[in-house]
């Protein structure tokens, strides 16, 4: 698969990009670097045994690094799995595609999907034959995947907002919002890096969050911007997750997690509640498979576990925190009943809930030479793992780092008894 160039309508102005101190939000108004080590949360009870907070993981879990993918020459910012492929986005604007089958990984025969004038790739999501990529240059790019060919081909269809959407909003004063002291912009435009994307359950809506403190909602059928929530937070928004029952969760450098919902019959999302427990920037969010538990990772080195109130009101309450990482939590992923975390301490940890509300750290993956910035994972359906210790499930975990490497880990987890 060859190099893909955007058509002229997709090409932004060339801009230099540096990630000083490897910060994930690098804003002059941000109070702290997302990689800095800040105090943990003494007011939140730990859900992990004290011994596991000092790297004593379960001895019944087996894991090893299958391969290290080295084709990127800059920071890895995003990873996602789609079909038979793993997609990776980096700080030098590249999107690369790999076979998700570890036995076919070969650093000499990688496929290059996109490269050129676009900025750092912060997030990637898939919908059918379309790939949406979020970029440092404030744009979302939409790629069409041609699945009729052996190697797949990719074409840049458009950027969001589309030219049509942008022009339509230019001629009415009501479409402009004040973005800085002496600057206005139409509400359909992000004015800073787009940090994360998420799709609604039915795929009809795409959500984007940005360091400009807003989140936007786009219709995937025609790419029209339907809504923009300005000043959703007081600082850069770093993460977003959607629940199947209609709740939207956003996490920000302002230390807060906000819960949003669009009620039936309403055109816009409204704020449902604000979750305040972290004492530093929230960098990552993840939802349990059934949507009943929210996990949030921050610079305070803790992963807070939020559970729905048993009273049935749907409110989230703090169950406790997962501790063990020695530096900021930068990314989270959930697969089956496992929670996976990546940190500025260069490690990946695997967590599982046990009896009651207790969690155990099943494994600590070591090997990256830089902070772990992104994760994705799946059940390993292609390769067995016979360790002679009974029944369990094999998983593949993919981790991307600021050391420019992607590592593929296989871990075998025994069934709970």
Image (tube, rainbow, N blue to C red):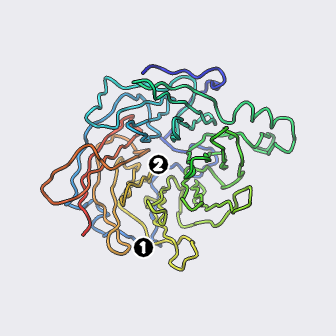
Tag 1 residue: 45
Residue 351 x %, y %: 34, 60
Locate residue 67 relative to residue 289 in the image: left or right: left
What is the secondary structure assignment of the residue under circle 2? loop
Circle 1 packing at 10 Å, graded few (<14), some (14-19), many (20+), is: some
Label located before the other in sequence (2 or 1): 2
Residue 25 x %, y %: 56, 45
Quarter of the figure with residue 160: top right
Tag 2 residue: 35
Residue 198 x %, y %: 55, 48
Q: Is residue 222 above or below residue 281?
A: above
Q: Which residue occupies 58% across, 53% down?
A: 253
Is there any visible trace of residue 123 in the rendered image? Answer: no
Q: Which residue occupies 63% across, 35% down?
A: 139
Q: Nearer the viewer, residue 33 or 230?
A: 230
**C-alpha span from label 2 to label 1:** 23 Å
Q: Is residue 126 above or below residue 61?
A: above
Q: Which residue occupies 29% across, 28% down?
A: 106
Mark 2 or mark 1, whichever is nearer to me: 1
What is the secondary structure assignment of the residue under circle 1? loop
Residue 369 x %, y %: 33, 40
């Amino acid at each position: 698969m060859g190099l893909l160039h955007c058509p002229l309508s997709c090409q932004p102005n060339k801009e230099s990009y540096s990630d000083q101190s490897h910060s994930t939000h690098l804003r002059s108004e941000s109070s702290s670097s997302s990689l800095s080590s800040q105090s943990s949360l003494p007011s939140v009870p730990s859900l992990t045994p004290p011994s596991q907070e000092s790297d004593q993981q379960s001895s019944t879990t087996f894991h090893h690094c299958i391969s290290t993918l080295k084709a990127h020459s800059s920071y890895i910012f995003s990873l996602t799995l789609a079909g038979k492929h793993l997609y990776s986005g980096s700080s030098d604007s590249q999107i690369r595609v790999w076979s998700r089958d570890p036995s076919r990984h070969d650093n000499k025969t990688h496929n290059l999907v996109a490269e050129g004038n676009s900025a750092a790739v912060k997030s990637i999501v898939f919908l059918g034959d379309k790939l949406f990529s979020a970029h440092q240059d404030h744009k979302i790019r939409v790629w069409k995947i041609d699945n009729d060919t052996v190697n797949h081909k990719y074409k840049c269809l458009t950027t969001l907002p589309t030219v049509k959407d942008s022009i339509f909003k230019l001629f009415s004063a009501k479409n402009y919002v004040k973005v800085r002291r002496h600057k206005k912009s139409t509400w359909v435009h992000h004015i800073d890096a787009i940090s994360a994307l998420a799709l609604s359950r039915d795929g009809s809506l795409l959500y984007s969050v940005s360091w400009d403190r807003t989140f936007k909602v786009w219709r995937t059928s025609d790419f029209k911007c339907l809504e923009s929530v300005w000043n959703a937070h007081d600082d850069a928004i770093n993460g977003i997750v959607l629940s199947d029952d209609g709740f939207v969760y956003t996490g920000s450098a302002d230390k807060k997690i906000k819960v949003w919902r669009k009620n039936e019959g309403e055109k816009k999302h409204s704020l449902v509640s604000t979750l305040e427990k972290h004492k530093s920037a929230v960098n990552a969010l993840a939802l349990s498979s059934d949507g009943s538990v929210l996990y949030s990772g921050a610079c305070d080195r803790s992963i807070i576990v939020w559970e729905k109130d048993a009273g049935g009101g749907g409110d989230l309450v703090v169950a406790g925190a997962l501790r063990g990482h020695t530096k900021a939590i930068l990314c989270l992923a959930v697969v089956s009943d496992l929670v996976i975390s990546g940190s500025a301490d260069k490690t990946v940890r695997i967590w599982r809930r046990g009896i009651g509300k207790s969690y155990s750290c099943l494994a600590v993956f070591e090997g990256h030479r830089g902070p772990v910035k992104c994760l994705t994972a799946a059940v390993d359906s292609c390769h067995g793992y016979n360790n002679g210790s009974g029944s369990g499930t094999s998983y593949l975990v993919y981790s991307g780092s600021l050391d420019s490497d992607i590592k593929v880990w296989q871990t075998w987890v025994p069934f709970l008894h």
